[in-house]
Image (cartoon, rainbow, N blue to C red):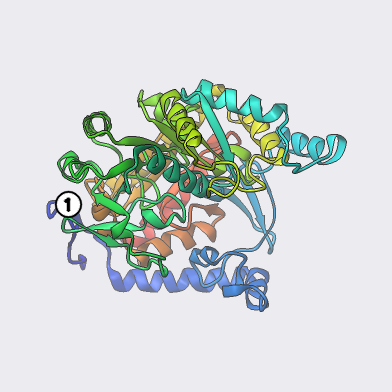
């Protein structure tokens, strides 16, 4: 059997990315799956072909990331199931890349939206109601920070919070980890290029070179982090507790605690982005790992698919912002913080329904148990196939990687990529009624996910590996 020449990570030559896969066989199998995908999804293909008035033929350009040449169109989605335009029912482990973490259209959310749109009326009024205070209090209970404000996405929450931390620290720069992702925030599109900040490959026409606004090092690298913070110009570190968008990269023992200590040592604030790591529990990684952030951002999962986001402030940080307001900073009108629809009544009603009745404390243990079954099943299959792959789990989220051991930072994670292999496995799943996230190999459990759904994925995954290396 032909073995792909090992690839090595950008930063650590000890991690070996070796797929014992015959590449010619893989190419033939991928062609078979593409042909089947086209044959069984004519209405989705026609929808894409006829979308002359949509830029890139999709509502948003990233929808073209789906494997197969065109994305699936859908007619309905309920719980953990999606029905596509051609009538195929798919088990959904993508869940809108966490946007549908609550499951698709759960009954409490439907009821709350109908109440807000119909009986109560008023979707957006620029005025507060009781739902907003309820959600703020619930976020405080879960994550520990006492002050909250709302946005329509985690991107906006991150963008506005970066303004606030620069305001109070009077420092110009932020720090992010190489290949991290915090939405479409200009300052965050940087990577570590041999110890120097560099605009991330593919970054689209930034207003300024982000290496002038941002410092960067690799995740899990406390030495590199201290080197960058020692310059004394970093207002805040913005990070996920575990990297997710480049593939799950878990923190090594002591890293998160060391990061907090270094931030304290150099007078730098710490922002935890919980948008995806909410999968670790009702209070995300912050509660699960006893983190002590100065601020938290979170987005899409809170509203069950209704656009929303939020950022939380520690009491000390909130007081510092208020002092800056007394000195002339404008956080009400033209200061670049906030938007007309932020905190609108529809979003806050959705968040109250999701947090109060769907993604409750009680549902997380069952979802995490399903993710553990999911991950253990994949590990067993990978071992039987004698593939140098690995599986990572983050609470209710699991992902397989084409590397062993699993990548420990963004550079290694990029080095572990294999687009051809990924496309084959994604299409193989779709063609057999199983959907995982198109951007990587992530699967997420929601309250409606069942043991039968996990078992169906396992059967599909075993069949795929049998075809691949059997």
- Lateral position of residue 78 relative to residue 70, left or right: right
Q: Residue at x 44, y 45 (%)?
A: 163
Residue 335 placement (x, y as % from top left): 53, 48
Q: Residue at x 52, y 23 (%)?
A: 140
Residue 195 in which image quadrant: bottom left
**Residue 125 visible, this angle:** yes
Count up the numbered dots.
1
Nearer-the-camera pick, 298 or 413: 298
- Lateral position of residue 126 relative to residue 322, left or right: right
Residue 177 placement (x, y as % from top left): 29, 48
Nearer-the-camera pick, 43 or 377: 43
Using the image, determine if residue 137 lies above or below residue 52.
Answer: above
* Crowding at mark 1 (Cα within 10 Å: few <14, some 14-19, many 20+): many
Using the image, determine if residue 149 lies above or below residue 407.
Answer: above
* Residue farthest to the front, as pictured: 327
Residue 264 in which image quadrant: top left
Quadrant the C terminus occupies: bottom left
Q: Residue at x 42, y 64 (%)?
A: 423
**Residue 458 visible, this angle:** no
Q: State the residue position of label 1.
A: 15
Residue 372 placement (x, y as % from top left): 41, 33
Q: Secondary structure at mark 1?
A: loop
Residue 424 placement (x, y as % from top left): 42, 64
* Residue farthest to the right, as pictured: 119
Q: Residue at x 46, y 30 (%)?
A: 323
Quadrant the N terminus occupies: bottom left
Nearer-the-camera pick, 378 or 236: 236
């Amino acid at each position: 059997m032909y073995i792909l020449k090992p690839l090595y990570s950008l930063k650590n030559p000890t991690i070996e990315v070796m797929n014992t896969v015959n590449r010619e066989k893989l190419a033939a199998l991928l062609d078979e799956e593409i042909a089947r995908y086209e044959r069984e999804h004519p209405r989705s293909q026609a929808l894409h072909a006829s979308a002359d008035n949509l830029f890139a033929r999709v509502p948003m350009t990233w929808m073209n990331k789906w494997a197969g040449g065109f994305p699936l169109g859908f007619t309905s989605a309920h719980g953990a199931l999606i029905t596509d335009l051609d009538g195929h029912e798919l088990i959904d482990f993508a869940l809108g890349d966490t946007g549908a973490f609550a499951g698709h259209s759960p009954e409490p959310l439907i009821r709350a939206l109908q109440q807000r749109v119909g009986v109560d009326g008023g979707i957006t009024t620029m005025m507060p109601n009781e739902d907003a205070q309820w959600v703020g209090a619930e976020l405080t209970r879960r994550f520990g920070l006492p002050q909250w404000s709302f946005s329509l996405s985690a991107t906006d929450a991150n963008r506005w919070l970066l303004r606030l931390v620069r305001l109070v620290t009077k420092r110009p720069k932020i720090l992010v980890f190489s290949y991290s992702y915090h939405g479409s925030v200009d300052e965050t599109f940087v990577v570590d290029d041999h110890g120097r900040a560099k605009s991330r490959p593919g970054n689209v026409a930034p207003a300024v070179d982000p290496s002038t606004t941002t410092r960067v090092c690799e995740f899990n690298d406390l030495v590199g982090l201290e080197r960058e913070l020692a310059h004394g110009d970093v207002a805040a570190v913005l990070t996920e507790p575990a990297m997710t968008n480049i593939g799950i990269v878990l923190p090594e023992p002591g890293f998160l605690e060391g990061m907090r200590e270094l931030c304290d040592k150099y007078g730098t604030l710490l922002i935890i982005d919980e948008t995806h790591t909410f999968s670790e529990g009702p209070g995300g990684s912050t509660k699960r790992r006893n983190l002590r952030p100065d601020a938290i951002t979170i987005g899409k999962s809170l509203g069950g698919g209704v656009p929303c986001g939020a950022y939380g402030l520690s009491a000390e940080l909130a007081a510092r912002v208020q002092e800056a307001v007394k000195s002339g900073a404008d956080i009400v009108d033209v200061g670049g913080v906030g938007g007309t629809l932020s905190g609108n009544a529809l979003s806050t009603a959705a968040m109250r329904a999701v947090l109060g009745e769907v993604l409750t404390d009680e549902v997380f243990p069952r979802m995490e148990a399903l993710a553990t079954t999911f991950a253990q099943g994949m590990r067993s299959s990978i071992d039987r196939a004698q593939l140098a792959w690995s599986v990572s789990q983050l609470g209710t989220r699991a992902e397989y990687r084409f590397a062993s051991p699993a990548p420990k930072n963004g550079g290694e994670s990029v080095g572990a990529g294999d687009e051809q292999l990924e496309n084959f496995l994604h299409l193989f799943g779709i063609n057999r009624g199983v959907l995982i996230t198109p951007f990587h190999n992530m699967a997420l459990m929601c309250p409606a996910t069942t043991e039968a759904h996990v078992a169906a994925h396992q059967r599909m995954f075993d069949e795929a590996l049998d075809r691949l290396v059997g």
